Image (cartoon, helix red, strand yellow):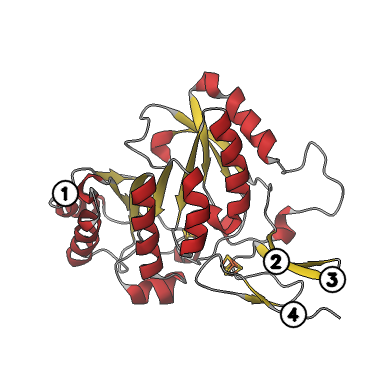
Amino acid sequence: MYENRLTCDVCPHGCELAPGMTGRCRARIHRVKDGEGKIIPLNYGTVTSIALDPIEKKPLARFFPGSFILSVGSFGCNLNCPFCQNHEISMKGAEDFLRDEPLTEADNHLTPAELAQIAVNTQNRGNIGVAFTYNEPLIGYEYVIDTAKLLREDGLKTVLVTNGCVNEATADKVLPYTDALNIDLKSYDAGIYRDRLGGDLETVKRFIKKANDNCHVEITTLIVPGMNDTKEEMIKIAQWIASLPGGDEIPLHITRFFPRSKLEDAAPTDVSLIYELSDVAGQYLKYVYPGNV
Ligand code: SF4
Ligand code: SF4
């Protein structure tokens, strides 16, 4: 009987999955078919949110400003940020979104071709492509790549809004099909990444570096009171971004936290602090955008 465990190599968690087991992200599973095991994305084609948004909302401030982008999300995430603004989908698994019955038009499933067609059909409303966002898109990178190839044939763009916490091999697969990214740099403290967010700072830095060599990159730091709200930490973040090739031209979005998820009872970030930290970052970077203020 087939009982092998397989290791998922998409992100640094390296989940070891027995047959039928789902990884920490709830989106990848060890499936056995005809006696052969394979780790596959359970969320392939499952769309839990779809909206035509201004590109500035991703946020991307310096990539086709004034345009719109078809924004889609699925389910699952490989991090577990206590302040997640999209926890209704990022913290959920297949059981919440997939159905046993045959798919009907009412189901939340879109093939890459169907999604690309919606993107084409909304070009007349200012749409420039598809943004994979809301949950973590790279834990289901296969769907991103399959759709991005079709979008490119139609002259449309692929945007990723990501936590950037994936292995280099995953980045190498997806970045050639990506035009622009907004990547979270949630803290400059490795302990906070590991213990509070379930991520890895060095992996995220490597991903940002690689993405910046290949695509248009903007970075977001959500300022959470008591987690990453000091001037010293902002100096480290801004200095590191500025040290990348062309780094002083990488836009940084410094955004305000609102109580959500496990931090529902926390106070929102002071608006004045967002402006103060934006001034600090502005000493190293040309484009700093205070957000949610
Ligand atoms: S992508 Fe998911 S299954 Fe794969 S290693 Fe990361 S958390 Fe585990
Ligand atoms: S990385 Fe983003 S989607 Fe995932 S838990 Fe953190 S805030 Fe939520």
Question: How much space separates mark 3 and mark 4, taking CA atoms?
Answer: 11 Å
The label nearer to you, 4 versus 1, is 4
- Element type at marker 4? loop
Q: Position of residue 2 (x, y in %)?
A: 82, 78
Mark sitting earlier along the chain (2/1): 2
Q: Which residue is at a point 54% across and 18% down the rendered structure image? A: 124
Q: Position of residue 218 (x, y in %)?
A: 34, 46
- Whether tag 1 and tag 3 are in contact, CB under 8 A, the answer is no
Question: How much space separates mark 2 and mark 1, taking CA atoms?
Answer: 44 Å
- Residue 282 — which label? 1
Reply above or below: 198 against 261. Answer: below
- Residue 4 — which label? 4
Mark 3 residue's CB less than 8 Å from ligand 1: no
Query: Callout 1, which amino acid?
Result: Gly
- Whether tag 2 and tag 3 are in contact, CB under 8 A, the answer is no
Q: Nearer the viewer, residue 257 or 49?
A: 49
- Whether tag 3 and tag 4 are in contact, CB under 8 A, the answer is no
The label nearer to you, 2 versus 3, is 3
Considering the image in quadrants, where does the C terminus appear?
Answer: top left
